[in-house]
Image (cartoon, rainbow, N blue to C red):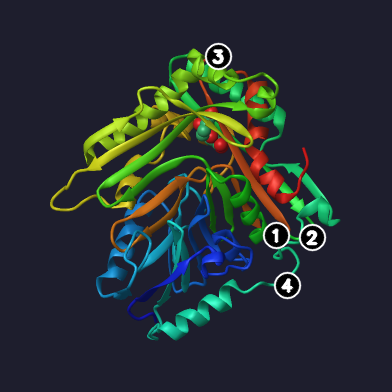
Amino acid sequence: MSSRLRALTLDLGPVDPGAGGTHFPHGGLAGALEHPDALCWIRRGEGHVGFGDAARFTAKGPDRFIEAEAWWKQLLLDADVEDEVRHPGTGPLAFGSFAFSRISAYESRLIVPELVVGVREGRAWATQLTADGSRPTRESLRAAVGHWTAPRSAAGSSSAGKPGAANGTHLAVRPGSLGEQRWMAAVASGVRHIRAGELEKLVLARDVVVEDDGGIPRALVLRRLASAYRDCWVYGVDGLVGATPEMLIQVEGRTAQARVLAGTLDRRDADGAGPGYAERVLAGSPKQRHEHQIAIESLTTALEPFAEALNAHDEPFILELPNVFHLASDVKAELAEIEGHVPTPLALVNALHPTAAVCGTPTQVAGELIRELEELDRGPYAGPVGWLDGAGNGEFGIALRGGVIEGTTAARLYAGCGIVDGSSPESELAETWAKFRPMLEALGVER
Ligand SMILES: C=C(O[C@H]1C=CC=C(C(=O)O)[C@@H]1O)C(=O)O
């Protein structure tokens, strides 16, 4: 039986070893990703890495966000917290991953780690958490940091280990639920439904499975994503791993922010085309602008009831990633107090998910067509993934550009595309390959 939650947070000093700071095995926070099951949330070298399992909540169904929120509140009620750092993410913290669909078989989850190491503005900190009656101390916390972040010699976890083909193991990519031809037929069918006026936009996804008989090197995949996709949020929650460029909602105090994406150009198609090409193809295309506008409206309409003030960029900007360019817009809101409370990250997630960037418009029609046409349980793909603390702060991205590790030797990768009137099945198929690329490369698959 678990007892009350106890948390101790200590400052570990600057991360820069030159300044006498914290030494993670490979430098920076991603260097703390040694343990194969580490929980991860990293962007531009900062964020949190968690280890162990002090407490866990799982749920399925339409109320998964609300039930998770109630569990977290209950756990915090009599928590014993000593926090010498006191900024977002310190003190009690849970990592979370939620199913895209209310009818998914995937268990949505919140995990309170036994240890969290974090970096913010160049300084490292650590929190030890217990729910077994023991009390964290300065000594036990420092011992836990040493234990969980120590370099490991197992294959695939050392920085020298290369994944997949480069390591001499056998790698294969096989089709998932639908092969390419059937998926393109589903896209064509989606376009027909749009032309018939049933809906404006639909996001259709597909999966592929990467098999590596040498074992999926989870920690190494996360480290590779954190180094190659620095502008994305790199997430790892149990088997779910990836690097998302899309922020569903980020809450710090009373400020909430989101990054809405829709409109994609494969970098390989832009190579050599000269400066301004992505701008012309994305921002200059009525189809891409329309798709993007639908995504922004779906987010702002859902966020408005929680906001005192809300700002979205008038003009989308071009987000440049190693694999693709996106049309992007940042939205910022000053949260309103509702019945004396600022809405929590999970209350906002409950209201915002699923946005038109991953489902479509209208939501219900798109959701039903997704079930019919994809023939796929999306599981946590395109669902919210992130963390929340005990003070009402948190970040939930949309679990894109990722996959789920199945067993020890397979990873199921997911990618989807916004379909509007005028979408071509062949181009959308090519776009899914561009969106699989971050994971394929991190797994060592050359394509
Ligand atoms: C659904 C995905 O991407 C979404 C986010 C950005 C751009 C998108 C697009 O241009 O279609 C998608 O809406 C995915 O990566 O699986």
In the image, 145 versus 385, the foreground residue is: 145
Labels in figure, total: 4
Q: On the image, numbered disc 3 is attached to which residue?
A: 422
Name the mark on residue 217. Answer: 1
N-terminal label among 2 and 4: 4
Q: Please rate how many residues cluster around mark 1, counting C-alpha atoms within 10 Å: few if below 14, some from 14 to 19, many from 20.
A: many
Q: On the image, numbered disc 4 is attached to which residue?
A: 153
Look at label 1 and name its amino acid.
Answer: Pro
Q: What element carries label 1?
A: loop
Q: On the image, numbered disc 2 is attached to which residue?
A: 214
Q: Quadrant of the N terminus?
A: bottom left
Please say if the residues under marks 3 and 2 sit with CB atoms less than 8 Å apart: no
Q: Which of marks 3 and 2 is in front?
A: 2
User: Whole-percent x and y of residue 21?
Assistant: 51, 69
Look at label 2 and name its amino acid.
Answer: Gly
Mark 3 → mark 4, Cα distance in angstroms: 52 Å
